[in-house]
């Protein structure tokens, strides 16, 4: 597969990049690594006429510790580089394990954390060659008016398969979004819409520049289940965090956005990480999950998987918290 | 779509090449420089046959690297891992243990294994699995590949400390 034609721009400053991104009628996209964007461009799924590369911008590959004990990660940090930071691997194990779960080592050597957070949703009806797609009617994702996954649906059910998003949400991370009007801070949990086409809450002209982790507290863990251990999209992922007073559980690769499980988390906050509470939380996950599509796996499997992932991640958190029960 | 001159060092040789923005490093290596050892496979980052090494020794996929982003950089391809007429220890181990079936993925597997050993000279089983997961033999000949990599590790240990390494 060959890349379509485009213009490649390397801004010297963030301001210049933002100006280029906002120029009307230019169809400009941001690239930060490109291991996913270039594939989608080869498939003809996205056809930007200009690419603005942000990885070489000043500070974009920095990892700095905050005065408050938190961590600031430049959006252009290569995933492999982050695994060499002891602050990441030691203080935020859920994030480290999520990073290890992304693609293959080759992909992690090229891909960035910002890029993984902005990963486009995918579907087996659209993430195919152009010829393959032409054999079907256009769907919501390809400017049509139907969803091949759920025929009666009024929306697109493409899946968010970012491995790092659930981990960052569980850890309470936020991102900095820069635009020509200034910057705003947004919790990663608020970065996504539950919609396969309109999947990110970022506004046109915005660039995700930084990921901000709060000071490390409590215990965290991440689990990915896929058909193969290496280089595969997940059938489901879960990230969990618990510090005794608050808990967060987030499922990934199950729907169009990372799915938080507040009922299950509340049970953990109230009852701790004993066997009975874990059982109850796993059962509650089903109610939290709501409706799921049959994209990539049947809904029944997804619900059972969610239950099992909650149980497994809570058991891991219990082990981490008490060194066993 | 204007072409841009890039300075690219390939296996120690410096090249000045005019590239289009939509040309990948793979296309430049194969089509402009005639280095066809790096293979064109899935072209979507799933198979690893296009693996080359960047400056720090890490394995990257040349099919997903834009040539314009390699201006001023250096890359090592399968053609450059040993002196002409010689074999790199990983190549020698692949040969010795028959870690080749149809051979199409072999350059990618060897570059991936070499990148692993360059960054971690004594990888354990899990590290080998993790690194090689991104380079696929579609003939499914992975067992002998792993045997060859393990043997290349042992061979390097024997050469460094002739008496210490287990056989």
Image (cartoon, coloured by chain):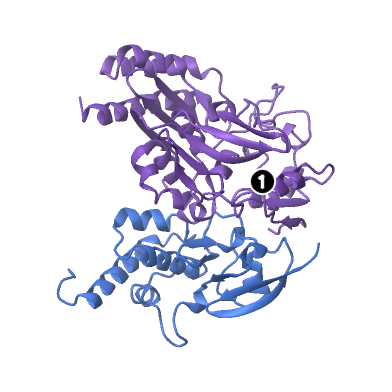
Which residue occupies 58% across, 44% down?
A: A115
- x and y percent of residue B125 in the render? 30, 56
Callout 1: chain: A
Q: Colour of chain A?
A: purple
Give the residue number, with chain letter if any, for mark 1: A128
- x and y percent of residue A240 in the render? 40, 28
- Check disc 1: other Cα within 10 Å, few if <14, some if 14-19, many if 20+: some
Looking at this rendering, what residue extends furthest in the right direction? Answer: A25
Q: Quadrant of the C terminus of chain B?
A: bottom left
Looking at this rendering, what residue extends furthest in the bottom direction? Answer: B85
Looking at this rendering, what residue extends furthest in the left direction? Answer: B163
Q: Say which quarter of the image contains residue A308.
A: top left
- x and y percent of residue A74 in the render? 53, 45
B153 and A190: which one is in front? A190
* Residue A322 visible in the snapshot: yes
Q: Secondary structure at mark 1?
A: loop
Q: Colour of chain B?
A: blue
A107 and A176: which one is in front? A176
The relative height of residue B124 versus residue A93 in the rendered view (above or below) is below
Q: Is residue A302 left or right of residue A26?
A: left
């Amino acid at each position: 597969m060959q890349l379509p034609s485009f213009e490649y721009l390397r801004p010297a400053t963030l301001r210049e990049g933002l100006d280029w991104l906002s120029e009307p009628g230019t169809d400009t996209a941001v690239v930060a690594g490109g291991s996913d964007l270039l594939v989608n461009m080869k498939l003809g799924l996205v056809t930007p006429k200009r690419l603005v590369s942000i990885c070489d911008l000043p500070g974009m590959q920095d990892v700095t510790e905050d005065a408050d004990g938190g961590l600031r990660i430049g959006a252009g940090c290569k995933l492999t580089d982050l695994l060499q930071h002891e602050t990441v691997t030691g203080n935020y194990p859920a994030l480290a394990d999520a990073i290890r779960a992304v693609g293959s080592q080759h992909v992690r050597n090229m891909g960035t954390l910002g890029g993984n957070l902005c990963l486009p949703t995918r579907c087996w009806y659209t993430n195919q060659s152009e010829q393959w797609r032409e054999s079907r009617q256009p769907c919501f994702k390809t400017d049509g008016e139907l969803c091949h996954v759920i025929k009666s649906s009024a929306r697109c059910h493409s899946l968010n398969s970012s491995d790092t998003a659930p981990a960052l949400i569980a850890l309470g991370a936020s991102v900095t979004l820069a635009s020509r009007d200034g910057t705003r801070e947004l919790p990663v949990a608020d970065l996504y819409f539950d919609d396969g086409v309109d999947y990110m809450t970022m506004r046109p002209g915005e660039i995700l520049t930084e990921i901000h982790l709060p000071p490390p507290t409590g215990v965290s863990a991440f689990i990915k289940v896929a058909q193969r251990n290496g280089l595969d999209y997940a059938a489901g992922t879960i990230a969990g965090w618990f510090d005794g007073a608050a808990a967060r559980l987030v499922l990934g690769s199950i729907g169009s956005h990372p799915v938080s499980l507040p009922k299950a988390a509340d049970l953990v906050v109230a009852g701790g990480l004993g066997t009975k509470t874990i059982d109850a939380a796993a059962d509650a996950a089903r109610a939290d999950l709501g409706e799921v599509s049959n994209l990539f796996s049947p809904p029944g499997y997804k619900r059972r998987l969610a239950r099992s992932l909650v149980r497994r991640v809570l058991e891991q958190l219990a082990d981490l918290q008490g060194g066993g029960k | 779509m204007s072409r841009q001159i890039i300075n690219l060092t390939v296996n120690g040789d410096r090249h000045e090449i005019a590239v289009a923005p939509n040309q990948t490093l793979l296309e430049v290596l194969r089509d402009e420089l005639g280095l066809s050892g790096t293979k064109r496979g899935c072209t979507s980052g799933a198979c690893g046959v296009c693996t080359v090494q960047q400056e720090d020794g890490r394995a990257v996929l040349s099919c997903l690297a834009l040539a314009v982003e390699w201006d001023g950089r250096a890359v090592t391809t399968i053609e450059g891992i040993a002196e002409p007429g010689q074999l790199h220890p990983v190549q020698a181990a692949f040969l010795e243990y028959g870690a080749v079936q149809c051979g199409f993925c072999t350059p990618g597997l060897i570059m991936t294994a070499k990148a692993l050993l360059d960054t971690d000279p004594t990888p354990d089983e899990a590290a080998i699995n993790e690194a090689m997961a991104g380079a696929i033999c579609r003939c499914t000949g992975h067992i002998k590949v792993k045997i060859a990599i393990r043997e290349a590790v042992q061979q390097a240990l024997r050469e460094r400390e002739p008496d210490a390494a287990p056989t």
